[in-house]
Image: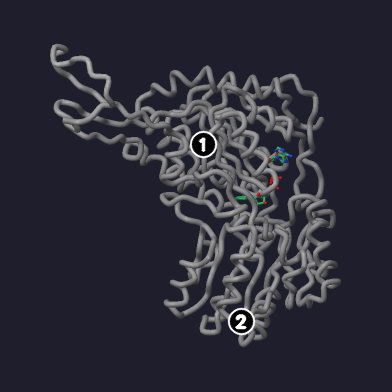
């Protein structure tokens, strides 16, 4: 009998009223391994009700209680991270070492959330007027909805829920239906670490479940990560329903290589950032801007390195795994036809890569395309696969112009040994996360993560100080303790004496 992955609501697995399910594949095998339950709006309502019921007690729990939970959760997660990595590889396809890296970056956020006693502190101004003090406190916003994408089934939930919970909120998490098991695993681990039932709930589904969260009157805030069209829709719909919302979208990340760069370092970086996780990263390098004078040499160095990569089942020590679905694999491979039609040069064709894995897996090997015209969809679209496009540019200025004319602004990198050029680059690009001789500049957990332009909607980035700010609302209190006889009638606007 096919196993069905159920929702996790109020501290236990729960099937709800829905009979609708969707298959969950192992992309390296190309076959469904289980089904996942797809929630109706009523099921989402049950999850929100559980979170709302748990809120008063969790909101009022002491900072010591919440810290102890996070410490225990951190220890359990660290001790069992290899089990979680197996789940990630089995449902997403990324190789085990990369799954380990995803978990490590998630763990960092849990560790950062432990700074909560400091970050939740308010401010105090004594005697702003005679005998009058003003102080502020940070309080949770309430029930928080988190909607996450397929490409980081553990890390993206971990970007949000440890901070939301640390700040005293309760959570309904709606992970991607393509690789949903990691979310249940994390919720069960949180329960084992002592999190009260109802504080962290997981509801599975697709648009129907998302829409129910976006309009539910008891959901106070939405954190979304996914593609730009859906991020824009989530932002607009949640805001129209009076919610606080942060919605992180897609990307098309450039890497500019100047003639004075260390070309071996740049070639290593392009390969790592272009093909890690089969290019299914919102910070993947997708468009390599190579200055004409070094382009031939750089392309040759990249192609040489690509010849050493092993593509195959992530459990076999390969460098790169499969794509998430057959449809996505075919869509990505379709860009090679587009490239040929648009007059680009296919240097390494991933359709011809020999694979260390099952024939039915969703494979496409690392692909390198040179001389890509900027009018081509290969350059313009977020391909989200192992396709690295090289665009040849005349120099620094043309590179900046291309980067800034992209509708996206998530990540960007420059490779150079010229500090002045790097400094100008950092000041002039309209991009949220910049790497200088660093290809995937994902900020550490105590800075915040987020792009510019169509890569983010709303003004709060993920995790870091902005995470705590998003998941809390401030109260400012003006207080005076003195004999009431010192009062008196005065209808004028309060002034200070
Ligand atoms: P997606 O937009 O298809 O799905 C994201 C979430 O939205 C999923 O939970 C999905 O169930 C839900 N969803 C899908 N269609 C919907 C609809 N029509 N209405 C409401 N909800 C819907 O994204 P994906 O394919 O899972 O993830 C890949 C995308 O995410 C890429 O574009 C990538 O760049 C982006 N991403 C961005 C970041 C970032 O931090 N900016 C991080 C990771 C991934």
Residue 314 point in image, percent of width and height = 68, 56
**Along the polypeptide, which appears first: circle 2 or circle 1?**
1
Q: Secondary structure at mark 1?
A: helix
Q: Which mark is residue 220?
A: none
User: What residue is shown at x 23% (from left), y 23% (from top)?
Assistant: 479
**Category of crowding for the residue at label 2, using alpha-carbon neighbours closer than 10 angstroms: few (below 14), some (14–19), many (at least 20):** many
Q: Which residue is mark 2?
A: 291
User: What residue is shown at x 56% (from left), y 64% (from top)?
Assistant: 412
Dividing the image into four equal quarters, which quarter contains ligand 1? top right
The answer to whether residue 110 is visible is yes
Q: Secondary structure at mark 2?
A: strand
Residue lying farthest bottom?
A: 293
User: What residue is shown at x 26% (from left), y 26% (from top)?
Assistant: 494
Q: Which residue is mark 1?
A: 161
Residue 420 point in image, percent of width and height = 43, 77
Could you tell me how far apart the alpha carbons at marks 2 and 1 are, in whole angstroms? 43 Å
Residue 461 point in image, percent of width and height = 50, 47
Using the rendered view, name the quadrant where residue 369 is placed: bottom right
Using the rendered view, name the quadrant where residue 121 is placed: top left
The answer to whether residue 272 is visible is no
The quadrant in which the C terminus is found is top left
Task: Say above or below: 69 vs 353.
Answer: above
């Amino acid at each position: 009998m096919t196993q069905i992955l159920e929702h996790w609501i109020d501290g236990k697995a729960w099937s709800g009223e829905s009979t609708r399910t969707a298959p969950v594949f192992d992309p390296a095998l190309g076959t469904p391994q289980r089904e996942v339950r797809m929630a109706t709006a009523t099921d989402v309502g049950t999850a929100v009700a559980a979170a709302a019921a748990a809120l008063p007690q969790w909101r009022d729990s002491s900072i010591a209680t919440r810290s102890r939970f996070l410490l225990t959760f951190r220890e359990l997660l660290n001790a069992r991270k290899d089990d979680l990595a197996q789940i990630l590889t089995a449902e997403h396809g990324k190789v085990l070492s990369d799954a380990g890296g995803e978990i490590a970056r998630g763990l960092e956020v849990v560790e950062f959330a432990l700074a909560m006693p400091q970050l939740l502190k308010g401010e105090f101004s004594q005697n702003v007027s005679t005998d009058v003090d003003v102080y502020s406190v940070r309080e949770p916003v309430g029930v928080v909805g988190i909607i996450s994408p397929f490409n980081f089934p553990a890390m993206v939930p971990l970007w949000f829920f440890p901070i939301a919970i640390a700040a005293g909120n309760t959570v309904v998490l709606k992970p991607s239906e393509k690789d949903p098991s990691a979310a249940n695993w994390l919720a069960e681990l949180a329960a084992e670490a002592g999190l009260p039932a109802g504080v962290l709930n997981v509801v599975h589904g697709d648009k129907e479940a998302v829409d129910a969260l976006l309009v539910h009157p008891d959901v106070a805030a939405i954190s979304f990560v996914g593609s730009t069209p859906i991020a824009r829709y989530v932002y607009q719909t949640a805001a129209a329903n009076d919610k606080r919302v942060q919605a992180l979208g897609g990307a098309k990340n450039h890497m500019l290589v100047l003639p004075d760069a260390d070309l071996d370092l740049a070639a290593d970086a392009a390969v790592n950032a272009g093909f890690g996780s089969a290019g299914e990263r919102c910070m993947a390098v997708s468009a390599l801007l190579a200055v004409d004078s070094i382009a031939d040499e750089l392309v040759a160095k990249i192609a040489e390195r690509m010849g050493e990569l092993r593509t195959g089942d992530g459990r076999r020590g390969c460098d790169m795994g499969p794509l998430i679905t057959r449809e996505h694999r075919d869509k990505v491979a379709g860009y090679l036809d587009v490239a040929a039609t648009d007059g680009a040069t296919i240097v390494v064709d991933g359709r011809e890569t020999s694979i260390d894995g099952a024939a039915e897996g969703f494979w496409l090997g690392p692909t390198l395309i040179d001389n890509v015209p900027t009018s081509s969809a290969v350059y313009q679209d977020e391909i989200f696969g192992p396709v690295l496009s090289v665009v040849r540019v005349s120099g620094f200025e043309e590179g900046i112009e291309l980067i800034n004319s992209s509708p996206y602004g998530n990540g960007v990198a420059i490779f150079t040994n010229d500090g002045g050029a790097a400094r100008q680059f950092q000041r002039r690009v309209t991009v949220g996360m910049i790497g200088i001789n660093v290809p995937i500049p994902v900020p550490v957990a105590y800075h915040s993560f987020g792009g510019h332009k169509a890569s983010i909607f709303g003004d709060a980035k993920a995790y870091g100080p902005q995470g705590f700010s998003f998941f809390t609302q401030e109260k400012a209190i003006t207080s005076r303790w003195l004999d009431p006889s010192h009062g008196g009638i005065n209808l004028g606007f309060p002034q200070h004496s």
